[in-house]
Image: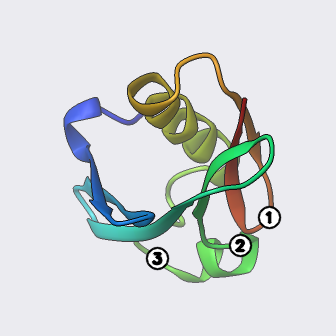
Amino acid sequence: MIDGRMVRIEQQGRGGEIVVTLPTGEWRWWWEFGGGDCLAFVHVPDDAQWESDPRLGGYPRKAFLAELGALIAGRQCPGAQIVVGERFIEFHG
């Protein structure tokens, strides 16, 4: 579903943006380094926001975000535990 070339990770200090370019448009989701055992987290649209955006509605949210989380972890924090929640993808070490 997600080709690695479609995802760019931009850093701006202790955070940045995850830029995802799909045929239906480009999305920018904010990420930040975490604290404690949370290495980082990405702010993502909740179920209602996802379904109300016709550009995202064609992608199954849970599977899409799980795949995105695995791709990000592989690049930035291999071996991290990935937790996809209602508003965040979290990476725990």
User: Which residue matches tag 2?
Assistant: 46
Does label 2 or label 3 sit earlier along the sequence?
2
User: Which residue matches tag 3?
Assistant: 54
| Amino acid on which disc 3 is placed | Pro
Instruction: Please give the name of the residue rendered at 51% of the width and 80% of the height, measured from the top-left corner.
Output: 53
Q: Are marks 2 and 3 in contact (CB under 8 Å)?
A: no
| Amino acid on which disc 2 is placed | Asp
- How crowded pointer 2 is (Cα within 10 Å; few <14, some 14-19, many 20+) is rated as few
Cα–Cα span, label 1 and label 3: 19 Å
Q: Quadrant of the N terminus?
A: top left
Instruction: Please give the name of the residue rendered at 62% of the width and 16% of the height, measured from the top-left corner.
Output: 79
* Count of marks, rendered view: 3
- How crowded pointer 1 is (Cα within 10 Å; few <14, some 14-19, many 20+) is rated as few
| Amino acid on which disc 1 is placed | Glu
> Residue 68, image x and y in percent?
50, 40
Q: Are marks 1 and 2 in contact (CB under 8 Å)?
A: yes
Give the number of the disc on residue 86.
Answer: 1
> Residue 56, image x and y in percent?
47, 66
Q: Does 41 appear above or below 81? A: below
Give the number of the disc on residue 33.
Answer: none
Q: Of helix, strand and loop, which one carries label 3?
A: loop
Q: Of helix, strand and loop, which one carries label 2?
A: loop
